[in-house]
Each structure stands twice: as structure tokens, then as C-alpha cells.
Image (spheres, rainbow, N blue to C red):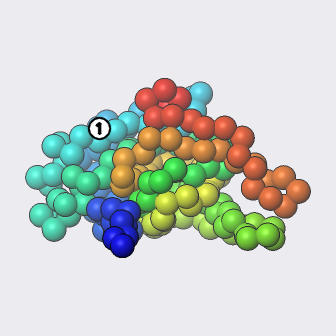
Amino acid sequence: MTTVLPPAPTTAPAGAAALAVALAVRTDLWAHRVEYREESRWTSLLDPADVADALDPSLHAELHAAQVWLLSWLPGQGTPLHDHGASAGAFAVARGGLTERVVARGAGRAPHQSTTDLAAGRVRYFGAHYVHQVVNTLHEPAVSLHVYAPRLTLMNTYRIDDGGLVRTGTERAGVDW
Ligand SMILES: [Fe+2]
């Protein structure tokens, strides 16, 4: 009998983290594109063709396997608690600082929560179905680079209810943000 294994992810978390950091430090590649929105965080897709020449060739496989988003956050702006569907990836803080709250699902017990302040230069990488919330809790704007592989198609949103993680909705890429 033949066992069919799911395809291996094309980008390892460490590769996504390296790519996020490499892009975050190259402010010349994205600083002129950053916008800030009063209503909510601002998001923009980076075209791999615009940045590939500036990156070390060792990162080209990650770049072409992934999708890269540039985000800006005014003070107080943030995400709901969410996952990234089947996408894994990484994000790096390029300017300002962000606070990340991570919720680990507990099997039959209350989820474990942790909160970390991430200054510019910090990077976090994550696997599929990772649940977190990201907020700019500082008094200055923040910018971050987010790498997803496979590309981000949806985010499920959550709330914590009676100690459990409850899905509240789904935001679809290209429709809801
Ligand atoms: Fe996220």
C-alpha cells in the first residue's frame, strides 16, 4: 500500500525569517512606498521582481515561494486575534515597535497566552494555524514586513471565550483587506 504524504512546505520558517529581516533592513526598497491610514493598518503586497536584485541570491528561493506584505501601523492600530490558515511564515519589525499576543491552543484545557514587545529589528516566525494578535501600543508609527508561504489567502479571527478559542469569522485576501 502506498502512503501519500502531503507536499512539504516550500519555505522553512527559518528561511521566511531570514527573508523578512533581509527586507526589513533594506529601507531603500520600501520606505518610499509606505502610507499610513487613519482608519486601520495599511497593507501592500511587495512584488518579488522589485526586490530580488537587492537580496542575496540565497534568499531567492524563499522570495519566489512566498508572498511578502508591507504593513504600517499608527499608534493604537492592530489586528484581531487571528491565524493565517495553512500559511506559515515570519514577520519583522522595521520601524517603531509592535506588541504580539500569542495564543497556543490547549488540547482540552485553557489556551496558553503570552505577550511580547517587539522592537525594530525583532523577527518572529510561525507555522501554519498559529494564532496571534499584533498591536502598535507605542506612540509612534510602526512598519513591518510579513512573509507567508504558501501565500496568504485567508485569516480566521478568534476570541477567547470561557477559556477556549472561538472562531468569529474569516477575512479573505483581496476581499477584506
Ligand atoms: Fe498575523
Residue 136 seen by the camera: yes
Give the residue type at disc 1: His
Instruction: Tell me where residue 69 appears, x and y as whole percent.
Output: 38, 45
Task: Pick the residue in front: 159 or 54.
Answer: 159
Secondary structure found at label 1: helix
Residue name at image x 29 percent, y 41 percent: 46
Question: Residue lying farthest front?
Answer: 1
Total number of numbered labels? Answer: 1
Residue name at image x 19 percent, y 60 percent: 61
| Residue 51 falls left or right of residue 19 | left
Instruction: Tell me where residue 14 appears, x and y as whole percent.
Output: 35, 72
Placement of 102 over or under 80, stated as above or below: below
Whether label 1 lies within 8 Å of ligand 1 gets the answer: no
Placement of 107 over or under 31, stated as above or below: below
Instruction: Tell me where residue 5 appears, x and y as whole percent.
Output: 37, 67
**Quick one: label 1, few (<14), some, or many (20+) residues within 10 Å?**
few
Disc 1 designates what residue?
A: 32
- The image quadrant where one finds the N terminus is bottom left
Quadrant of residue 25 within the rendered picture: bottom left
Instruction: Tell me where residue 89 appears, x and y as whole percent.
Output: 41, 59
| Residue 145 falls left or right of residue 42 | left
Quadrant of residue 132 within the rendered picture: bottom right
Task: Pick the residue in front: 89 or 121.
Answer: 89
Task: Pick the residue in front: 132 or 36.
Answer: 132
Residue name at image x 80 percent, y 59 percent: 164
Residue 112 seen by the camera: no
Residue name at image x 75 percent, y 66 percent: 111
Quadrant of residue 26 within the rendered picture: bottom left
